[in-house]
Amino acid sequence: MNVPICVMPENGVFCASLLGKSETNAAGATPEAAVAALRRVLQQQVVNGELAFINIEPRGLERLGEKFKDDPAWHAYWDDIVTEIYRERDEQKKREFPE
């Protein structure tokens, strides 16, 4: 599970905090140490039942990507789309910047 955090220098150390819940934070000498300390805080909150996990259904394009992620026909179709986009881009460049 990925959660958004913020890491900022503060008074000679780095503070990492959970976005939206600034009271959930930890400090360290380096950004990496602050993140590691925050990870331990979050893990302990899960153990204590203070944090829980919920599943959020993807929306929009993310949902579409999830639907077709294992479909080889979709990947081939997508490759064709990308190839055509690059071909059109290259033709436009040739028109705009002739050699």
Image (cartoon, helix red, strand yellow):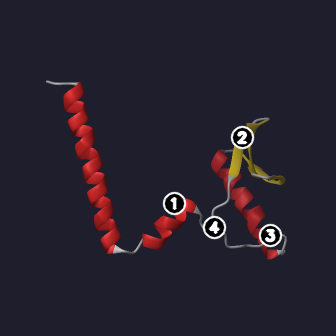
Give the crowd class for mark 1: few <14, some 14-19, many >=20 residues within 10 Å: few
Give the crowd class for mark 3: few <14, some 14-19, many >=20 residues within 10 Å: few
**Which is in the foreground here, disc 3 or disc 1?**
1
Where residue 33 appears, x then y in whole percent? 67, 51
Q: Which image quadrant: the N terminus?
A: bottom right
Question: Along the polypeptide, which appears first: circle 3 or circle 2?
Answer: 2
Relative depth, front residue between 42 and 99: 99
Residue annotated with mark 4: 1
Residue annotated with mark 2: 8
Residue at 70% of width from left, 45% of height from top?
A: 7
Label 3 and label 1: CA atoms lie apart by: 29 Å
Contact (Cβ within 8 Å) of mark 4 with mark 1: no
Give the crowd class for mark 4: few <14, some 14-19, many >=20 residues within 10 Å: few
Residue annotated with mark 3: 51
* Amino acid type at mark 2: Met
SS at mark 3 in the image: loop
In the picture shown, does residue 49 fall above or below 14?
Answer: below
Question: Along the polypeptide, which appears first: circle 2 or circle 1?
Answer: 2
* Amino acid type at mark 1: Leu
**Which is in the foreground here, disc 2 or disc 1?**
1
Contact (Cβ within 8 Å) of mark 3 with mark 1: no
Q: Which image quadrant: the C terminus?
A: top left
Residue annotated with mark 1: 61
Question: Along the polypeptide, which appears first: circle 4 or circle 1?
Answer: 4
**Which is in the foreground here, disc 4 or disc 2?**
4
* Amino acid type at mark 3: Leu
SS at mark 2 in the image: strand
Where residue 83 appears, x then y in whole percent? 25, 52
Give the crowd class for mark 2: few <14, some 14-19, many >=20 residues within 10 Å: some
Residue at 81% of width from left, 68% of height from top?
A: 45
Label 4 and label 1: CA atoms lie apart by: 20 Å
